[in-house]
Amino acid sequence: MTFDMPGKSANVLTDEVWVDLSRALDRLESKPPAGVILVSAKPTIYVAGADLVKISNTLDWSDDEIIRFCEEGRAIMSRFSRLLSVSVAAVHGVCVGGGMELTLWCDHRIASDDRKTLFGLPEVKLGLVPGWAGTVRLPRLIGLQEAIDLVTTGNLIDAKRAKELGIVTCVGPQSEMIDRAVQIINDELASRAFLKKRQAMLGAVTDMPHDLDALRQRFQQQIDSNREIDSSAPSIVLQHMIDTAGVDQQAACHNESLAMAKVYGSIENQGLLHYFFLDERSKKVRSDYGEVQPPRIERIGIIGAGLMGCQIAKLALTAGYQVTLFDADQNKLHREFAALATGKNGQNIRVADSFKTFADADLVIEAIVEKLTIKRQLFEQLCQVVGPEIFLATNTSTIPVSDIATAVPNPARLVGLHFCCPVEPLRLVEVIRGQQSSQTIVNVAIDVVRAMRKTPIVVGDHPGFVVNRLLCPVFNQALEMLTHGIPLSQMDASFREFGFAAGPLEMIDFIGVDTIMYAGETFLRTLPELVSLNPILPALVKRGRLGRKSNLGFYRYESFDSVARIDRELDPILDRYQKEPLSLDNDQILDRLLEPMIAAGRAVLADGVVDDSRDVDLCSVLGTTFPAVRGGLLHWADELRRAGS
Ligand code: NAI
C-alpha cells in the first residue's frame, strides 16, 4: 500500500487522504492478503502527520467536534490493528505526528537506515497533544518512561534510536525493506505471535513504575526547565499519560481526546501554529539567479574581530568557507585568531596583514564599529585594494546600507548582512537590499546565510531595518524607566516572564552598550521620534562598562557566557541621572516596554521595510526572541486587540 499525495512533496492526513485510506482498508478487509506493507512514494517524508491547514481553520471547534476529530481518525487507523493480515509500516523518511501514530496501529514498523528517516510525536511543539492514540499505544509498546519522554519533549529520533527503544523491529537499507517486511509477515503467520501482541496493546501499560507520582514530578521538572517549549501542552499530556497508564486502551484513548480538547484552539496553539506557518514560509526565501551562473563563494574575508566578526567567522568556518580575518587592533586580532584556529575547521582561517590579503576573497564582510564615517573610510580604503568584482557586505545594525554605499565604487555589489547577537541561538539574518544593491549580491547573501544554517529575510534599507527598529524603542523605554528608579532586575524579569530569552538591559549587555549607544545616534539622526537622548549609555561607555564583552555593563559577569550578577557599583552612576521616582508593577512595566515595540512593528510595515506583517512576526521571534508561543509581535498585538474589542 503506497502513500502518494499527488503533486505534494509530503504526505499529509487531509480529508481526502482519510477517505482514500478508508476505502483502501475496505478492500483489505473484504479480501485480506497475508500481509500489508505500508510504504511512501515520497523521497524524504513518509507521512508528515495531521493537516495543519485544516487545524488552523478549525481552531474554534467545540469540545465535541475536537473529540469527534480524534475518534474518527482513530477509528480509521485502528482498522490496521484488526486486519486479518499482518501489517508492517516500512518507513523511509520523516514519520511524525499523525504519521507515526498511523504506524503505531500496525503490527510492525521497520525503518531505512537513511539519515532522513526520523520518528517522533512533536505535537506539543504546536501546543497540541497527539490525538490518534500516540499517547496510548507508544507507552504500551516501549514503556511509560520512554514514551513520556518522547511525547513531552516532542523530540525526533533516528532509526537507530527507534530500534533501541523498540519502536521499530529492524533497520536496514531502503532497498531491502520490502524483503524484510515479507520475511516478518511470513514469520508472524507461522508463529501467530502478532495476535498476542495485539491483545497486549488493548490492556494497560505493563511494567508500570510503582511510584507514578515521583515519575510525574520528575518529568514535570524536565518540562519546567525546557525553554524550547513554552506551552501547557507538555504538562497536560504528562498528566494524561500518568492517569491512563493503568487503564485499558479504549479508556486511555477517550482521555486522550479530552486532553486534546483542552489544548486545541488555545491561545498557545494558535500562536504556535501561526509561528509554524511563518517558519515554513521563511524556508521559501531562496536565491534566484535565473539564467545566470551563480558565482562561487569559497573565501570570505571578515573585517573586525570583535564580538560580531568572531561569531560570523566561526559560522563561516563551520559552513566550510576559507576565512581571512582582519582587525585594526593587532593584539585582539591574533588573540581571536588563535581561539578560532583551534575550533571547527580551524585550519581554514588566516589573518590578514593588510587589506591586500583580501584580494583573493569572494566576499568581504565588514563588522567594525557602528559609526558611519569610520565604515565609509574603511570601504574607501578597501576598494582601493580589492578588485571591483569582489562582493561586499556590511553587518551594520542600524545604518542604512545606501549611506555606506557612497564610499563604494560599484555599489551594486554591496549588501547588508545583519546577523543578530548572540549569533548561535538567534537564527535570523536580515539581508538588506540597499538602493543600489544588485539582485546578484542579494542572491549571494541569501546563499551564504543558508550555507551558515541561518534564516535569511530580505528587508528594505531603513535605519535599524526590522530587528533594531523593534528593539531600540524598547531599550529606550527601559533606560527611561531606569532614570525613574525602576530596578533593572524588575524590568528584565518581567520581560523574561513574558517569554523573551532576556530582558532589555540584559540584551544591551549582550549586544554591547557602546553598539547600542551608536545605534541610538543613528536613530537620532534619521528617525529622531523613535528614541530620546539618554545620558546613561554614554556614562557607562565612558567607564568602560561595555556589557558582556568587557565583563561589566548593566550587570557584572565572570566571563562572556557567565550569569549576570547585580553590581552595586552601578548605583552611583545611575543616581546622577535620577528624575522623580515612579513605582510600577510588572504589568505596567511590560506595557511600557511593549507598546513602543508594537508601534515600531506597525511603522516597519508602513515604511515598507517589509510588506507583510508575517515578516515582522518572524523577525520578532527569530531576531528579538519574542515568544513563538504568542505567534509573533503583530499577531499577538492583533489578537489582544480582537480580544479587547
Ligand atoms: P565590537 O566593538 O565588539 O568590535 C568591533 C571591532 O572592530 C573591534 O575589534 C575593533 O578593533 C574593530 N575595528 C574598529 N575600527 C576598525 C577599522 N577601521 N578597521 C578594522 N577594524 C576596526 O563591535 P561588534 O559588536 O562586533 O559590532 C560590529 C558591527 O556589527 C557594528 O556595525 C554593529 O552595529 C554590528 N552588529 C552588532 C551586533 C551586536 O549585537 N553587537 C549585532 C549585529 C550587528
Image (cartoon, rainbow, N blue to C red):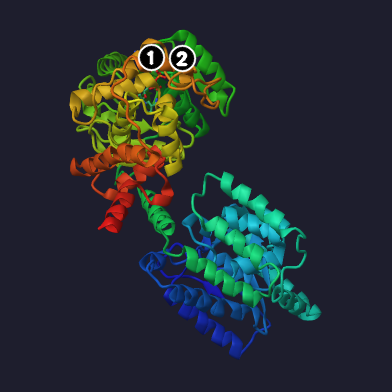
Compared to residue 624, the image places residue 571 above or below, namely above
Q: Position of residue 474 (x, y in %)?
A: 32, 33
| Left or right of residue 201, residue 637 in this image | left
Q: Position of residue 27 (x, y in %)?
A: 56, 87
User: Can residue 44 be spotted in the picture?
Assistant: no
Q: Which residue is mark 2?
A: 569
Quadrant of ligand 1: it is: top left
Q: Secondary structure at mark 1?
A: helix
Q: Could you tell me which residue is drawn at 62 percent across and 51 percent down? A: 220
Q: Label 2 is placed on what type of residue?
A: Glu
Query: Do residues under tags 2 and 1 come within 8 Å of each other at their CB atoms?
Result: yes
Q: Label 1 is placed on what type of residue?
A: Ile
Total numbered badges shown on the rendered structure: 2
User: In front: 306, or 57?
Assistant: 57
Compared to residue 250, the image places residue 359 above or below, namely above
Quarter occupied by residue 396: top left
Q: Residues within 10 Å of mark 1 (few under 14, many from 20)?
A: some
Q: Could you tell me which residue is drawn at 35 percent across and 32 percent down? A: 583
User: Can residue 564 be spotted in the picture?
Assistant: yes
Q: Which residue is mark 1?
A: 573
Tell me the CA gap for discs 2 and 1: 8 Å
